[in-house]
Image (cartoon, rainbow, N blue to C red):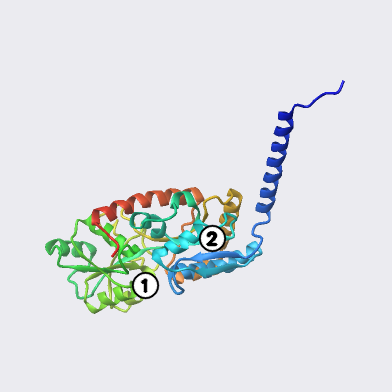
Amino acid sequence: MINRIRPNYITNAIALLGFCIAAGVAQAADSVYPTRPVRLVVPFAPGGGVDATARIIAPKLSGSMGQNWVVDNRTGAAGNIASELVARANPDGQTVLLALDTQLTANPSLYDLSFSVEKDLQPVIILAVSDQIVVVNPGVAAKTLKEFIALAKQKPGALRHGSAGVSSSNHLAAELFKKVTGTDIVHVPYKGAGPAIAAVIAGEIQMNVSSTASVIGFVRAGRLRALASTGAKRSNLLPELPTVAESGYPGFEAVQWYGLVVPGATPKSIVARIHKDSLKALQNADVRDSMERLGLGQEPTTPEELAARIKKETAQWAAIIKDAGIRLQ
């Protein structure tokens, strides 16, 4: 008697075989990643902190992964052009974004995005962090942060602060500062951090919050007075400078960070490989020295920690943007 195999058994067996083959192919692809040069998308023009970080880290990743990491500057729309490009890319790890924090955490509250940061982008690691410094014109009658806050409260609406533009990271940091300190300081947007800093030096405005790297030279030359840093701890470049938190506002923190993210459906094994090689690169003495010269520190995260940070800061900036009535002009 010939045993007959039921058709549904055959169907199930074929489906199982197909699944195993697909899984095997995917695993094999992951194990040989990357298969060609990796495109490292940078959302800003050459010369800034994000671009500099990319060009410091890319050669190290090229060496450890056996394929070149090629920096591709895609500017515009406060980083949204670069974010969308990566969000829509094939999830094979061959296209990676080095993002500025507010690009992922503030932009969703300011722009009608065609993609979801949470669903279409997958966090990998923070490569660099940069404190910001509260600086004033040396002619301002305040030698400390407490004195400046007292002055601002005595003259609500009389003092002005500048930024690199509406919704820029230093604009948002200043708005958080005003909310926490209860001060009324008028915002004046400029077309870039450089013009805003120049305006403080010239006395057009009284205050600015900018990255350590962008103002430290002027502080040391006496052209700007530093009042506090915005990090959780003191800056290595200005160890004598207290933080805002130390100055009477515990818990205050507003730092810039630059993080790697990949398309949302990228396999976890590829994310793990990028994370592992990035950690190795950050431990390189040349990388640390180059970053320190730019005023950049290291606070590497796991993918899960970065995802949690993005979620937390997205809620924080959404509240600040709403309370301050920030609108794109």
- Of labels 1 and 2, earlier in sequence is 2
Crowding at dot 1, Cα within 10 Å, few <14 / some 14-19 / many 20+, comes out as: some
Task: Mark yes or no: residue 259 visible.
Answer: no
The residue tagged 2 is: 96
Quadrant placement of the N terminus: top right
Quarter residue 156 falls in:
bottom left
Cα distance in 3D space between marks 1 and 2: 26 Å
**Taking 18 as reference, is 261 above or below it?**
below
Callout 1 amino acid: Ser
Crowding at dot 2, Cα within 10 Å, few <14 / some 14-19 / many 20+, comes out as: many
Nearest the viewer among 146 and 73 is 73
Determine whether, in the image, residue 66 is placed left or right of residue 187. Answer: right
The residue tagged 1 is: 214
Q: Secondary structure at mark 2?
A: strand
On the image, the x and y values in percent for residue 272 come to 58, 52
Q: Work out which residue is located at the far right of the displayed protein and give it.
A: 1
Determine whether, in the image, residue 191 is placed left or right of residue 49. Answer: left
